[in-house]
Structure formats: structure tokens, C-alpha cells
Amino acid sequence: MLSCREISETATNYMEGALTLRQRAGFRMHLLMCKHCRVYVDQLAKTVELLKLGQINWDTTEPDPRVIESFRDSAGKS
Amino acid sequence: MVLTGAGSRREELALIRALKRGDEKAFRQLVAEQHKSMLAFSRAFLRNPAAAEEAVQETWLAVISGIGRFEERSSLKSWTFAVLANIARTKATRDGRSISFTDLGYGDAAVDPDRFAGDGSWLSPPGRWSEINPERIVGARQLLAHAMAVLETLPPNQRAVVTLRDLEGLSSKETCAILEVSEANQRILLHRGRSRIRAVVEELMGTVQGRL
């Protein structure tokens, strides 16, 4: 039987589908019986959701003049 | 957002073709969307901000000269990050500062060990984050700002993995290829990085429960 602490260490492997069939079954069995670990796994999943928004919320940037010049130079050549 | 989301493959193909045609607007859009995250990624390799910026600028130049030969079946984002990783890695090695993907931080526990009893069960369990759900999370700007700040403090190898996987949404396969790291090590780094960010968000949410 997996302990809660072991669940906290293998949660990403579980989410990544990287556990063996047997490990996966053990993980799910634990989640069925332990609401704290369900909350934990949910928090980890929400952390990932939160990070996804990080990319979308970056400020946008203008290209460097050197870069845009190089783009113009090569336009049509390739 | 042209480059995000699974349903945007067709838009990505259109963007690649526009770039090949020399469409400046398309290129400006690509830079607008990608530059900041490329810079963040570059800084995982190069601590010096000027060197990190330079690596990204060199990447854009390499993208411009290579786009004509770019094969449309691969992902543009994955390719640009691979080019950047190579450039940044070379610079970092030159400065004697290459980042290690073998030092995985085994010592770090995902959760503070004091929160578990001797048998490994929760002493101080996590509380439900009812206020956060993907639809309403956008309102939680402050939370996001904190998460991004923690990301900056992660060890470079964890930061690189979390950036590619969670911010950029690249697959584990793409991430492993870009960082030249095994899938198993990539997962360990991903777990360490996500765990640290989760712990900070948990503290901010004030949902750590008292001892059972």
C-alpha cells in the first residue's frame, strides 16, 4: 500500500502516464480511499493550469531592429 | 494566440508558410508571442541577462536563415526552442556555466516532510483550492505573478523543464530532445519544479490545514 508521502512523490509520474499498470492501480486505489491525496493531486493539476497562463500573459515584444532588417534581407530569397 | 492550444496546428502551418514567403507581419507576430518566453528560457542557461538576450537575438537570426529549409511536419515552437537551447548551451559552456541535467535534486521532497507522520500519512493535509479553477483562474493575477516569481527561483534545470512543458505546452518527447535529457530525469525535474510552485501557491491560498 502506497503512503500519502509516496503519492506526493509519484503524482507527476501518475499524471504523465509513466507508472506501470500495477503502480497505477495502487495509486488509484489510494486516491479512492484518501481525500487528502485527492486534494493534493488536484492542487498539482491546478498548478499546471496556472502555469499555462504564464505564457499567455507575457507582455509582447517588438523585434530588435537588427533582426527585422535581417528578415527583410532574406525575404524572398529562400 | 497562434502558437498555443492543440487546435491551432492549421494556424501554425499558415504561419510557417507566411514566414517562408517573407511576410513581415507574421514574423512580428511570432516574435511578439515568443520572445519573452524564449528570454525566460534562455536565462535558465545564462545568468547574465545581456548574454541571455543575445542568445535569443541570435536565435531569431538563425530562425530567419533556416525557415526556408524548415520541414512543416515538425512544430515551429519546438524547433525555435531547440535552436535557442543549442545557442544558449554553447554560450554557457564557453563561460564555464553549463547547466546540469544529472543533478536532479533528489534531496528535495515534493512536500515538506514535517507534514507527514512517521508512516507517511498526512499530518497537515492540503486544503481544497475551491477558488481556483481553470475558468476563473484568470482573475488570480497575483497568484500567477507569484507562481512566475517562484519559477525564476527554481534551479535552472527544473526551470527549463517547467518552462517548456507547462508554459509552452511542449510534449515530454520534444522537451527531452531539446534539453538532451532522459524521459525519467525530465519527469523528476518536472515534479520537483511543479511541487515547489504548488507549495508556494498553497501557502498563498492559506489552505494548509492544521495538524489532524
Image (cartoon, rainbow, N blue to C red):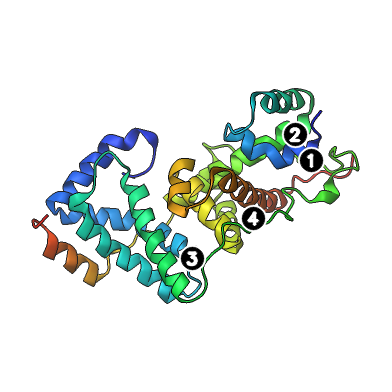
User: Which residue occupies 41% across, 68% down?
Assistant: B90
Amino acid bearing label 4 = Leu
Crowd band around label 1 with a 10 angstrom C-alpha radius: few (<14), some (14–19), many (20+)? many
**Do labels 2 and 3 touch, CB within 8 Å?**
no
Q: Which residue is mark 4?
A: B104
- The dot on residue B45 is 3
Q: Which residue is mark 2?
A: A37
Q: CA distance from mark 1 to mark 2?
A: 9 Å
**Do labels 4 and 3 touch, CB within 8 Å?**
no
In what element is the residue under mark 3? helix
**Do labels 1 and 2 touch, CB within 8 Å?**
no
Q: Which residue is mark 1?
A: A5
Question: For residue B2, what is the image quadrant?
Answer: top left
Residue B17: percent from left, percent from top:
18, 44
Asked whether the residues under marks 2 and 4 belong to the same chain, the reply is: no
**Residue B171 visible in image:** no
**Do labels 1 and 4 touch, CB within 8 Å?**
no
User: Above or below — where is B180 with respect to A24?
Assistant: below
Asked whether the residues under marks 3 and 1 belong to the same chain, the reply is: no
**Between B198 and B92, which is closer to the camera in this rendering?**
B92
Amino acid bearing label 2 = Cys
